Amino acid sequence: MKTIRNNVFETNSSSCHSITFSTGYPDDQKDYQLLVTGDGDFGWGYDKLETPAEKMNYATVAYACICASEDECEQVLSEIKRVFATHGVNVNFSENDVGEQQAIWFEVDEWDKSGIATAHTSGYIDHQSQPHESDNCERLAKMFRDDPDELYSFVFGDAYIIIDNDNG
């Protein structure tokens, strides 16, 4: 077998998500309100995610797949809020402006016999049930967890995400 492309996770699926990361650092915002709902059906139909809300929701859904615990999640979301606030951005991680449902919530899945609560969002990223180290979605999820300042750069910089498929 001959390797044609390096660091590419391949399936027989027709969907493709391409994430372009920022090269520069964006300016601070002025009293920007960012509502993060954790929703979005990021499947295989064509879409280009460019707005701060679209990119942040994609990152939130990606992070939920690697989130280890409710305590970790609370710490990560608090740190993101703190860092983004230093740039003039108020981040609200809830499904609506009243805060009735969090963007990421924890519950025990019916089929999971361990009884351990896992992270959930109302969003979906195609093929995201098993993250891969070389995958850009995994990189984005780890950025969400480990580097809120870099996440800020991704969300408010010139980064974008293309969702497409080869069903032409």
Image (cartoon, grey):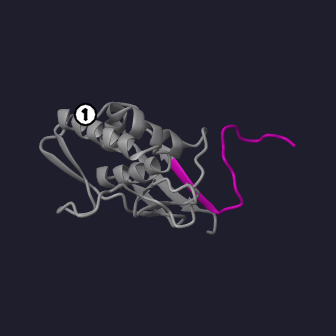
Residue drawn at point x = 28 percent, y = 62 percent: 101
Q: Residues within 10 Å of mark 1 (few under 14, many from 20)?
A: some
53 in relation to 74, above or below: below
Q: Give percent across and percent down for residue 50.
A: 36, 52
Q: Furthest residue to the right? A: 1
Q: Give percent across and percent down for residue 19.
A: 49, 46
Q: Give percent across and percent down for residue 52.
A: 30, 49
Quadrant for residue 123, please give it: bottom left
Q: Is residue 84 visible?
A: yes
Quadrant for residue 2, please give it: top right
Q: Is residue 34 left or right of residue 124?
A: left
Magenta residue span: 1-18
Q: Give percent across and percent down for residue 167.
A: 63, 68
Q: Is residue 49 left or right of residue 84?
A: right
Quadrant for residue 44, please give it: bottom right
Check residue 125 for magenta coloring. Answer: no
Residue drawn at point x = 46 percent, y = 38 percent: 142
Q: How many marks?
A: 1
Check residue 16 for magenta coloring. Answer: yes
Q: Which residue is mark 1?
A: 83
Q: Is residue 150 left or right of residue 1?
A: left
Residue drawn at point x = 40 percent, y = 43 percent: 159
The residue lying toward the viewer, choosing from 97 and 151, is: 97
Q: Helix, strand, or loop for circle 1?
A: helix
80 in relation to 160, above or below: above
Q: Furthest residue to the left? A: 31
Identify the amino acid type marked 1: Val
Q: Is residue 22 visible?
A: no
Q: Is residue 145 left or right of residue 17?
A: left
- Look at the magenta stretch and give its main secondary structure: loop
Which quadrant: the C terminus?
bottom right
